[in-house]
Amino acid sequence: MSHVLEVQNLRISFPSGQSRVYPVDGVSFWLNRGETLALVGESGCGKSLTSLALLQLVPAPGRIEPGSAIQLGDMDVLALRGEALRQIRGRRIGMIFQDPMTSLNPVFTVGDQIVEGIHAHFKISRTAARDRALHLLQEVGIPDPVERLKAYPHQLSGGMRQRVMIAIALAAEPEILVADEPTTALDVTVQAQILEVLDRLRASRGMAVLLITHDLGIVAGRADRVAVMYAGQIIEEAPTEQLFAQPSHPYTQGLFASVPRISGPLRRLTPIRGTVPAPSAWPSGCRFRPRCPQAFDKSEQEPPMLPIGPDHVMRCWLADTPRIVAADERTR
Amino acid sequence: MTPALTALQEAWRKPQGRAGAALLLVVVVSAVVGPWFLPDPLAQPDILAGSRPPGLGHPFGTDQLSRDILARVVAGARVSLSVALLAVGLSATIGAAVGLISGYLGGLVDAGLMRLVDGALAIPRLFILLLVLAVWERVPLLALVILIGATGWFATSRLVRGEVLRLREETYVRAAEALGAARRHIILRHLLPNTLGPLLVAATLGVGDVILLEAGLSFLGLGVQPPTPSWGSMVLDSREVLVSAPWAGIFPGLAIVITVLSANLFGDALRDAVDPRSA
Amino acid sequence: MNAPADQSSGLLSVRDLKKYYQAGGLFGRAAPPVRAVDGVSFEVGRGETLALVGESGCGKSSVGRTILRLQEPTSGSAMFEGVDIFSLDRAALRALRRRMQIIFQDPYSSLNPRMRVGAAVAEGIEIHRLAPRKEIPARVGALLREVGLDPEYARRFPHEFSGGQRQRIGIARALAVEPAFIVCDEPVSALDVSVQAQVLNLLSDLQQQRGLSYLFIAHDLAVVRQIAHRIAVMYLGRIVEEGATDQLLSNPRHPYTVALLSAVPEPEPGGGRTRIVLSGDLPSPSNPPSGCPFHTRCFHPLKNERCRTDVPLLRPVAGTLAACHYAETTPQPAEAGAA
């Protein structure tokens, strides 16, 4: 299976006073056709910036550092400019954002915005575009699509708006869909609806999906693989089942221990002590060291990604130290 | 680092802010210490000699009554700046008070006050001032300041009211209400400090307006009365000798332009510094 | 986890609370009012936490604000320690504010950006003159320590702190007046997962140490499970189910509760339970359905005409109170033909 997207050593810097900081500091991952990779992390870990980099949408004064590589099939995304770049935006990589309220233009109808998305990449007649828009609305499960085409964003609920966003993103028929916290602003029952739509579309179109979220719950059962980010780096990556069965990096374990559960024995949550560091103050050595309950002398050196199982890697020295306590003992 | 200091610092960082602030500083400093080093602006040492062009001893020249123009420009700066600061201070205070009360209390109070403001805004300020000053001969300086201040608060009150309408929905205002704070406490402790930003900007820009206004009134003979020097009256006096002694009109004119320009530049930079960070 | 509560002494008693908002009315055309809260009744005992759970638009936040009289109710009553909240005059209301406090959802807007943290925490103390001026810094320091912050932070401004720390400051501010009851309006919804856990633990500990009662407003059932003794589920301005936490979560009787529960994403390998995906959209609160408010989206096999005409009242069913005509036979997710 060749990778439909491959990111190598992505680094993004921002100016800070006289020097620069690196909120994304050496991120590498890949996506296969038709699979979902979840990029999980809390605020400040750099996951959103990473997704923006894929389309060269990193806001100024941030910049992508040389040495970073983003390959789309056989195309080097970072070398693209102007028209060539515009061609891939939407058409090969589509993006949906967190807040459907502000991502849609309030003064244009839903139909207009979808058609705009279509016309950006396909030279077809207005009627043909309108038909396609109708079809898209049906695909994302919006009832009364004919009526909805003429509706304005404010006339729709949050869930409907997010479906419209998905429809617009799909209008250009991308191979890859980047969904940046697509359900965070939505209620839990609506969340379920939207995730179901995304699943269905992914299956029917063979799209690859990069799902960015802080919610471990929506990852379970929806993503094929998970990469956990902390302080600008990926610190653990594994197929979903593996990660949930055996979270190995102390940060991942800490996350699982601090998530409230709806079922199972009720116990006091054990939060990770301390707070997330700012990019200007990344700790030296292992960045999780100050908060890690298992930190030891080797933690003072920055660990590389080390394997701990088939397809399972983590950025932690404990990987080659036989000190790992079995994950079940830790989180149950 | 208080929010106020950070705003000032940011305004200083922009080139136009720095230029404006620097120029203003020059004007203010010369107004304050200048008179000690300069000849008496009222002295007419050598009337028969008439106006002299700029040269040694008189960097800006002398006017037709042989008064040193530099001294008069600097003295005029004192007058114009004081009038501007006091009048703007008065406008800002009244405008803020009305805007805060109107905005927070709402209801009939708000409706009443705003109708008053609407009516007042319908009448041109200059018109009112001209009317009053034409009748009141030789108006004392303090009265002039009060007149200008009292006619300049209407727009500010609308501005402050707008801010208050937005602010009073802020969660921290809810929190203060939940703590049992009285209305006065909320207005003074929570609303006023958060309107200071736009208020300060309006005031700084207002300084430019008032200087122009005062200069204009003085030019018409209605503002600052002789023998107190004022830029506007200096320009008025220079009309008769504009061809033979243009420096008598150029320098006061330049002073007006530079001061108003720098106030506006600094005000703009301040607005940029305050706006994006207004909570 | 949840300390046993003394439910014998009702601290707060709310009866048939209604809050309608007058919508539009532009150009004189009267629009139907938005029925944010449409007849809500509940009790909270000393030292206990009642969670008010529901999705956006269900009216839970309005309930919280109305019982504190941050908004005036349309009708209904609320008694706190035997005092009728809605009939108090300004002075008495101010006294009440010492006993009932609130913590807000958004840590970024709940603190005045131009006020130092110490001043914010001390505000309540000053308003109610609870301590002489000299003692205030010490009190503030103690409060900050109680919420897990360094007393030195009193000199700083809110923007220097993270969301979690700001929430703690907000909690300290509420505690400063020594309340008996705190409305927690989605206090952890805007926080990251690990920070959420810290704040939840803090709230729990404070409840034990100070004997506080909470009305905990949230949309996340998993969060609520950690801290609530009882849960009331709201839909379109009404309570549709109410009961003890364990009971309600293990054996929900109202179809909406069942759907809500099944939609909660669970971080378990394999994705957890099957989810019930509700069809349709939330009806508009200014035009609620006739009869049972949930009938337009209800999946109960026994749903019929009666649901469209008769409004079901909360009645005891298998250990909880549920407002459903057929609550005895509500299907659970495995049986309900999940998506």
Image (cartoon, rainbow, N blue to C red):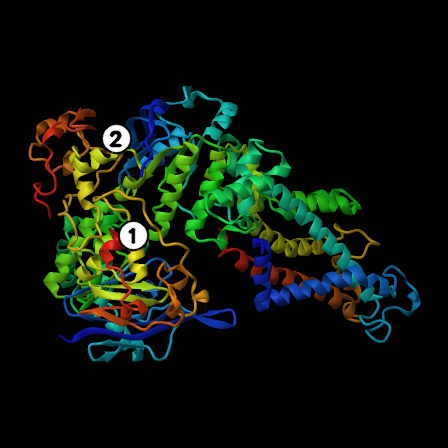
Q: Which element carries disc 1, helix, strand or loop?
A: helix
Placement of C41 over or under A12, stated as above or below: above
Q: Which mark is residue A257?
A: 1
Residue appearing at x 29%, y 59% in the figure: A252
Q: Quadrant of residue A168?
A: bottom left
Query: Front-most of C165 and C237?
Result: C165
Residue appearing at x 16%, y 68% in the figure: A124
Q: Tell me which chain the residue with mark 2 is part of.
A: C
Q: Amino acid under label 1?
A: Ala
Badge 1 crowding class, 10 Å Cα cut-off, few under 14, some 14 to 19, many 20 or more, is many
- Please report contact status of discs 1 and 2: CB closer than 8 Å, yes or no: no
Q: Nearer the viewer, mark 1 or mark 2?
A: 1
Residue C35: x and y in percent read 29, 32
Placement of B81 over or under B61, stated as above or below: above
Query: Front-most of C253 and C302?
Result: C253
Q: Amino acid under label 2?
A: Arg
Residue C323: x and y in percent read 19, 28
In 3D space, how far apart are the residues under numbered discs 1 and 2 (Cα atoms)? Answer: 34 Å
Q: Which element carries disc 2, helix, strand or loop?
A: strand
Left or right: C185 in relation to C327: right
Whether residue C59 appears in this view of the structure is no
Query: Front-most of B243 and A220?
Result: A220
Residue B92: x and y in percent read 63, 46
Q: Are marks 1 and 2 on the same chain?
A: no
Left or right: A149 in relation to B185: left
Residue A117: x and y in percent read 23, 63
Q: Tell me which chain the residue with mark 1 is part of.
A: A
Left or right: B82 in relation to C209: right
Residue appearing at x 65%, y 57% in the figure: B208
Q: Which mark is residue C238?
A: 2
